[in-house]
Image (spheres, rainbow, N blue to C red):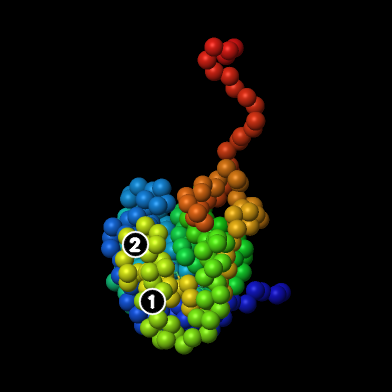
């Protein structure tokens, strides 16, 4: 039987270096906004549930979920071996956290809520990852997923990336303060601060193997191919979606009349 080979370590080497050799800062206020408010969730939504963060980098969101929720189990999936090893050290004393080093397109687990943030554009086969992640949801389990989008701004930055992705990691890191202000034009970027914008700049322009930009019709077609009912999709923002597994709402176009003409 043919099985899909896992995405290579080399494809994520630059992320691995970023997450293990550099420092990221975030406040609980930022985590709360990113993991709850922006996703249309109350802070206690995850209590008593199994939560997963897929493509979790250095585990900053796993840390926030462990510290800010009463989730019973928090699963972290990360391909880069050094980043996963770092997470295992960080969460050694946290029995609720399980770190799985592996390819998001292959790792099987069961969760009530999954985050897939800032990552699907960097995987080798986005549809395969989306299908696997959705299959890992329990019935009525929810997924929040963000995509890099095709926009005039992202298309204008792409020629710069064709040069920067060839630079040695440490040189690009040294240049990232110059590129960081590009990611502080939007309010959310300014709120996260300069150090965070520097990481975003490195993320955007780095030498990782895969980086794609999506259109909304492409995204909806991927959701359909992954078996998501259209009524189970909520657009939270540009390139930012919440999905639910399981049966959708029963909708039709019958017109109902109210008020003076109602029968
Ligand atoms: C831009 S980082 C985002 C990390 C994290 N979600 C965050 O926001 O802090 C993307 C991460 O996805 C990981 N990654 C890429 N392809 C993957 C795959 N197929 N399976 C699991 N992780 C993967 C990379 O190693 C990297 O750590």
Image position, residue 127 (x, y; %): 62, 63
For the point 59% across and 76% down, which residue is it? 6
Asked whether the viewer can see residue 182, the reply is yes
**Residue, disc 2:** 190
Image position, residue 96 (x, y; %): 35, 64
Image position, residue 207 (x, y; %): 51, 81
How packed is label 2: few (under 14 Cα within 10 Å), some, or many (20 or more)? some
Determine whether 223 is above or below 74 in the image.
above
Image-quadrant location for residue 19: bottom left
Residue 167, numbered label:
none
How packed is label 1: few (under 14 Cα within 10 Å), some, or many (20 or more)? few
**2 vs 1, front mark:** 1
> Does the Cβ of the disc 2 residue fall within 8 Å of ligand 1?
no
Image position, residue 47 (x, y; %): 35, 51
For the point 70% across and 75% down, which residue is it? 2
**Residue, disc 1:** 178
């Amino acid at each position: 039987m043919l099985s899909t080979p896992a995405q290579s370590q080399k494809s994520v080497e630059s992320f691995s270096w970023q997450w293990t050799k550099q420092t990221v800062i975030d406040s609980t206020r930022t985590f709360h906004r990113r993991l709850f408010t922006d996703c249309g969730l109350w802070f206690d939504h995850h209590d008593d549930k199994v939560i997963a963060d897929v493509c979790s980098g250095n585990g900053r969101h796993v840390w926030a979920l462990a510290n800010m929720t009463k989730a019973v189990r928090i699963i972290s999936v990360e391909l880069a071996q050094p980043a996963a090893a770092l997470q295992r050290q960080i969460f050694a004393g946290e029995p609720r956290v399980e770190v799985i080093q592996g390819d998001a397109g292959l790792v099987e687990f069961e969760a009530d809520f999954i985050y897939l943030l800032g990552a699907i554009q960097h995987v080798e086969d986005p549809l395969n990852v989306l299908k696997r992640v959705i299959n890992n949801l329990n019935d009525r389990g929810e997924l929040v997923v963000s995509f890099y989008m095709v926009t005039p701004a992202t298309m204008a930055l792409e020629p710069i990336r064709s040069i920067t992705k060839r630079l040695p990691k440490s040189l690009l890191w040294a240049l990232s303060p110059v590129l960081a202000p590009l990611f502080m034009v939007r309010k959310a970027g300014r709120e996260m601060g300069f150090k965070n914008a520097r990481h975003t700049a490195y993320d955007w322009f780095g030498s990782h193997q895969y980086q794609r930009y999506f259109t909304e019709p492409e995204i909806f077609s991927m959701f359909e191919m992954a078996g998501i009912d259209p009524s189970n999709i909520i657009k939270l923002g540009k390139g930012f979606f919440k999905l639910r597994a399981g049966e959708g709402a029963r909708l039709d176009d019958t017109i109902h009349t109210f008020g003076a003409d109602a029968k």
